[in-house]
Amino acid sequence: MDWDYIEGNWKQFAGKIKETWGKLTDDDIAAVSGKREQLEGALQQKYGYAKDKAKTEVDEWIARHK
């Protein structure tokens, strides 16, 4: 699965995103609106992740949801 698929089906994946990263609010998820860079930025803000860590977290999440 690639990010384009997730972006196109964002509403379906939004709940799974929230299960994984519970600190993200509904407003955060709505603001991300399927954009990977926005999700990584939200993870950096809410979890204090470095940019590389946020990217790795998202990569690992995608791998788990193939």
Image: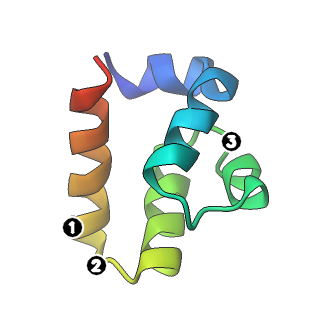
Q: Residue at x 75, y 48 (%)?
A: 30
Q: Earlier in the sequence, mark 3 or mark 1?
A: 3
**Residue hosting label 2:** 50
Residue beneath label 3, please?
33
Q: Are marks 1 and 2 in contact (CB under 8 Å)?
A: yes
Verify CB contact (< 8 Å) between mark 3 and mark 2.
no
Q: Which residue is mark 1?
A: 52
Position of residue 12 in the picture relative to residue 3 (left or right): right
Q: Quadrant of the N terminus?
A: top left
What is the three-letter code of the residue carrying label 3? Ser
- Dot 2 falls on a residue whose secondary structure is loop
Left or right of 27? Residue 23 is left
Residue at 61% in and 18% down: 9
Image location (x, y in percent) of residue 16: 52, 35
Give the farthest residue toward the bottom.
Answer: 48
Q: Which mark is residue 9?
A: none
Measuring from the top left, give residue 38's x and y in whole percent: 55, 56
> Of helix, strand and loop, which one carries label 3?
loop
Say if 24 sits above or below 34 in the image. below
Q: Count residues near mark 2 (Cα–Cα under 10 Å), then give few for <14, some for 14-19, many for 20+.
A: some
> Separation of disc 1 and disc 2 at Cα?
6 Å
Q: Quadrant of residue 25?
A: bottom right
Is 6 displayed left or right of 58 in the figure? right
What's the distance in space between the residues labelled 3 and 2, CA to CA? 21 Å
Residue at x 43% of width, y 77% of height? 47
